[in-house]
Amino acid sequence: MEIIILILALGLRLIGIGQSLWLDEAISANVAKMPIGEIVRNFSIGDFHPPFYYWFLDLWTEFFGSHVIMLRLGSVLFSLITIYFVYLIGKKIKNKKIGILAALFLAINPLFVYYSQELRMYSMATMWLIIGFYYFVKIKSKKYLKRDLVIFNLMMGLAFGTFYGSIFLIASFAIYFLIKKEWKLFWLTNIGTGLAIIILTPLLLTQIKNSQIMLVQVTNWTLVLGKVNLKNLLLIPLKFGVGKISFYPKIWYYLIGGIWSLIILGLILKNKKESNWLKIFLGLPIFLAILFSIKSPLLQYFRFLYLVPIMCLVLAINCDKKWQKILIGGGFLIFSSMYLLNPNYYREDWKSVATKIENEKSVYMIESFSDPIKFYNPKMEIKDIKTITPTENEIWVIPFGEAIHGINLEEKLKNLGYKRIVQKDFREMELEKWEK
């Protein structure tokens, strides 16, 4: 049965896998083209993530090339491994039926489906953490071998080296052993994370310094970081249940999504001995992230993707009635299908934009958002609208990200004597033509 679930998961993840790269994915794809030794020196110091995922991507493209589908297959593979380990965890903490149900829930969960296709580090980090979680279950039961400790430490080190946000689940493991007064296990299970932190500290300090500069130079950079507010808190359970999609009118989206989230939350909060301890690792990482985000904002739902497998384990244990299993599985599948089968829910269509202007020599836009154009049309000249004043009679403009930089692009061009003559929508972004 577990093989059938993995085949189902793979089939779902192949739907729409060739869709256009969006901004952050294009950054990953372009970094993968760099020599592996230059990734830290020329990219990571200005980025806000550790380098391991980019190193992997560099090697992946050496073997499989840079076609969008091949690039995304890495994330698909990580998700399948995660699903299999969720099955093993469920089987270990209760029985095979629970393992199969948890794996099924995860295979069709809409948020996990989305990030299983994305060319970013979240699927990889989730894999490391959930493999580690399997060995944590063995360690906490006191039925473990030395190799289990070694593998757990390796997974935690790799997770931190892939995504700094992994630290909140890693810290939750440590806090668990502190609460249980398992001092020896506390130290033995933090060796991998400690080594990873020591190795990455010089880079991390540089990244923190550069992030402070970014906050000063980019007017509204905090908009993309994830402040502690009610909206970002509510989006976590909402997106865990309905995934990346959003639809209009918004009142129906919030009503349907809110009711669905409350149903899931109600099942999670059921008092069942077998799942109560799991809830610690569902809630504690979010609590720690809230505390951290008061000083350094990062409270965005996708940064907690690694909690979705744990949520599915809790749901599998707590859904003890057939109708509950059908309800959760059916709901997840409906929302996943809404995303996969409707391209209107996909991210920005940079590929079509690049195709539309492929015969043009240049395009005006904010240069720091130009990675997708550089990926799809590397020969095109990007003119930074922030620093270069247009002088041509006709110009193509991609008005993307100007709100973050505090630029009123329309007002600026009108003041220069330009008039917009073409405006085309390409899913969450636009392409415009202006003339004097």
Image: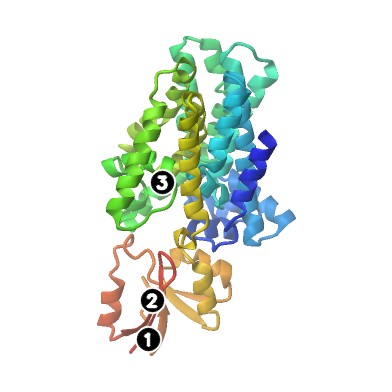
Please give the residue where the numbered disc 1 appears in the rendered image.
Answer: 391
Kind of residue indicated by mark 2: Ile
Q: Gap in Å between the C-alphas at discs 3 and 1?
A: 37 Å
Please give the residue where the numbered disc 3 appears in the rendered image.
Answer: 209
Q: Tell me the SS state at disc 3.
A: helix
Q: Is residue 211 left or right of residue 125?
A: left
Q: Is residue 342 left or right of residue 423?
A: right
Can you tell which quarter of the image residue 29 is in?
bottom right
Can you tell which quarter of the image residue 419 is in?
bottom left
Residue 187, image x, y percentages: 54, 17
Look at 50% across and 29% down and name the residue there: 322
Question: Relative to 352, is 135 above or below?
Answer: above
Look at 64% across and 47% down and name the residue there: 10
- In-front residue for pair 436/41: 436
> Dot 3: few (<14), some (14–19), or many (≥20) neighbours within 10 Å?
few
Image quadrant where one finds the N terminus: top right
Image quadrant where one finds the C terminus: bottom left
Q: Gap in Å between the C-alphas at discs 1 and 2?
A: 9 Å
Q: Gap in Å between the C-alphas at discs 3 and 2?
A: 27 Å
Look at 60% across and 36% down and name the residue there: 83
Kind of residue indicated by mark 3: Lys
> Dot 2: few (<14), some (14–19), or many (≥20) neighbours within 10 Å?
few
Please give the residue where the numbered disc 2 appears in the rendered image.
Answer: 388
Q: Which mark is residue 405?
A: none
Give yes or no for contact between labels 1 and 2 (Cβ–Cβ under 8 Å). Answer: no
